[in-house]
Structure formats: C-alpha cells, structure tokens
Image (cartoon, rainbow, N blue to C red):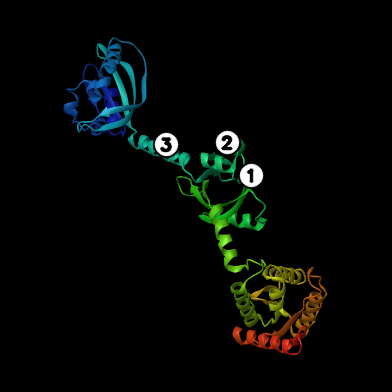
Amino acid sequence: MEESEEKFRKIAENSLVGMFIYNEYFVYVNKAFSKMTGYTEEELLQMHPWDLVEENEKETFKRLIKRRLRGEMFTFIHNDSLLVTKDNERLNVKVSAETIRYGDSYAGIGIMIDISDIVKKNQIIKVLIQALSQSDDIVFITDVNGTIEYVNKALLNIYGYTREEVVGGTPRLFSSGEHDKSFYKELWQSVLEGNNYNQVIINKKKNGELIYVDTKITPVKDERGDKISYFTVTARDITSRVLREKKFQELATIDPLTKIPNRYQLNQYFDEFIARTERTGITFSVLMFDIDHFKNINDNYGHYVGDCVLQAFSQLIVDNIRVIDKFGRWGGEEFILLLDGADEHIAMEIGEKLNTLVAEMNFDMFCSVTVSVGVTSYHKGETKEKCIDRADKALYAAKNLGRNRVVYN
C-alpha cells in the first residue's frame, strides 16, 4: 500500500495536471494544483474544496462533496468551472472527480486542467464569427478543394442564394463567364502555392446580374504550417464604384455627341501607335477628315441638323473600318482616323474608299455631304505634333484644290 502511494505521489508531483484528494479539507495537492490556485500546499491543506469556487456555487459543491463523503460512488466531470485563485482571479478549469476509499472512510480524488487559454480562444472565435456574420463584406471559407464550408449573411444577401444552395458547392456557382479558363487557372495556381491573392473579379448573382467584387483569398495552413487546410475569401461589392469610374472614363474619353473617342483619347491612341512603331518598326497612317461647307449646314438648317450630320458621318466611318483602327472626333467637324499597319498606298486607297462612301450616302435632308481628307504616314523618330501637322497640311491642300478629295503629304 505504501509502495502504491509512493508511486502515485511521484507521478502526481511530475504531472502538469492539477491533482488533489479531499474530504472535508484537502488532504493532498500536487505542485501543479498549487500553482494554478496560487496557494501554497500548506494553505490548501487547511481549506475546504468549496473555498475555491464562486460564492453562488459553494452550496452546490458542498452537497456534492457530502454525498461523496457518505460513500456514494459517482463521477463528476465539469468541462468549464470557474476557479477563484488566491489573487481573486478567475480561471476556467476542467474538473473530473471520483469517490475512493481513504483509510476508514471515503474521499474524493480528482484532476484539474487549466483551460483558460482554450476558452479565451473560443470566445475570440465566437466574436470573430459574429463579426463576420454581421459584416457588410462577403466572407466565405472553403476547404483545399474549393468546397464551400461557411458563408456569412452578406454573401447570401448580395448574391441572392440561400445557405443550403451555397454550402457544399464551389465558387463556380458565382462564375459570370467574363473571365477565361486561364484567369482561374492562374488564380488557383497562386493560392495553392500558398500566396495571398487579390483581384477584382466579375461574378454573377442568382438573378443573372453582374457584380464586381474586390476579392482577397488567403490560404490557411495546418498547425505545423506544412499543408493548406482552408481558404478564407473576403470580398467587397464595388459594382457602383466600377460603373461610376467607367462613366467618368467615358465622359473623359468619349465625344458625347458622336459616341466616338474624343481628342484626349485620340492623343492616347496616337502615343500608343508611335511607341509600338518605335519598338517594332510597324508603321501606321493618319487620315484627317473635314466635312465640307459644314458652317453652311449649321447656318441654313440649324445646329440640330448639323449634329445629325456629324453623328451619321461618324457611324458611317465606324462601320467601314477595322477593329484595330482608331477613329475619333478631333474637334468641330474635324475627325482623325489612325490606320494600324497601313503604308501610304493602303492609306490612300482607304481614304478614297471612305470619301466615296460619304459622297454616296443619303443624309436624308440633303442631296449630298462631302468631306476633304488629308493623308500622311508616320515617319519613325518624328514627334506626334509633326505627323499631325503634315496631315493637317494635306487636308488644307485638299480643300484648296476644290474639296471632296483625298490628298497625301
């Protein structure tokens, strides 16, 4: 018996778990138990077990202990008790106790584990979950295969799905078709390598409406940091901002009357064409148009009719050029067409073709409308201004020669 008690004491003294034996008072406590409570062993051996609990729980603990001391055999397990320490702090502890024979009577033996850190972490998790649930931003969590395991209310409200429709599925549910396969391939390759990902993605709501979301994907690794276990995805609906910016961009770069690029946008296209020519040697040509006698149209028929002529002329040119060419309003009744990869011969051919189309077009309220066209080709190494000036001189040469003609300079 003494040998067994000695083994027990050796095990207990080296244990990180609090161990104790009690009847009316504690009759044994190990170092771990003493450390948790803040009391010395001597102090604890003069204390009742219920002295370590909150005042409102003392009577409950007394009744349980009295039952045990009468010899009732039962197990007591409490997963979250509050221990009152010597410094009057509260520790969350897990307690397990049994009834044993102790000499000629009965006693209780038990263990106690400090779970304060676990409880604190769980409380933090609860707060985070509540915060995520109430967040206006979209939040969802997937496993490493992309299966959605958690979504917050904002996602359901914004996309229009129920929780049952989303959880267990994949983010493909939100795919809009606006991104190609290579876009998603690069996304997955990046996050599977453990990288954080941030990109504006165009998704689709349940009702088919497109939505722009500023998306952040964060890989979450296991405790060892070796493998990715989850992906957390947070996203903000920026649709209103994107559409507003597009509108501002349109106002800044599109002529409001003709709905074609304005002078500012044409200058940008010009710079891009020049940079590419200087880099690759592929040239381009410039056609400058001026509607003949346009002032007479405004004076004789009014500005509304003049506006209609500008719109009809712009649409005619747009309908008869390539997608890679750039056409815009330079100012008033002057327009510029940038012909990608065209030398002077091709440029003149296209200029003659467009000039003829304008002359043959029925503008409803007029017998005919004609244009004068100045043509030039960009010379590698020259400035944009010099090239435009040359096209402008060709245009005025065409007007001086009687209008309704194409002149190269």
Residue furthest top in the image: 70
Q: Nearer the viewer, mark 3 or mark 2?
A: 2
103 left or right, relative to 234: left
Q: CA distance from mark 1 to mark 2?
A: 13 Å
**Pick the front one: 48 or 220:** 220
Give the image location of residue 8, x and y in percent: 29, 26
Instruction: Identify the mark at residue 126; answer none if there is no mark.
Output: 3
Q: Residue at x 67, y 55 (%)?
A: 181
Q: Mark 2 — residue?
A: 163
Residue 212 appears in the rendering: yes
Q: Residue at x 27, y 25 (%)?
A: 20
**Pick the front one: 28 or 282:** 282
Secondary structure beneath label 2: helix
Q: Quadrant of residue 113?
A: top left
Q: CA distance from mark 3 to mark 2?
A: 19 Å
Give the image location of residue 319, x and y in percent: 76, 68
Q: Quadrant of residue 393?
A: bottom right
Circle nearer the N terminus (3, 2): 3
Q: Amino acid at mark 1?
A: Leu
120 left or right, relative to 383: left
Instruction: Identify the mark at residue 173; answer none if there is no mark.
Output: 1
Q: Is residue 91 above or below residue 376?
A: above
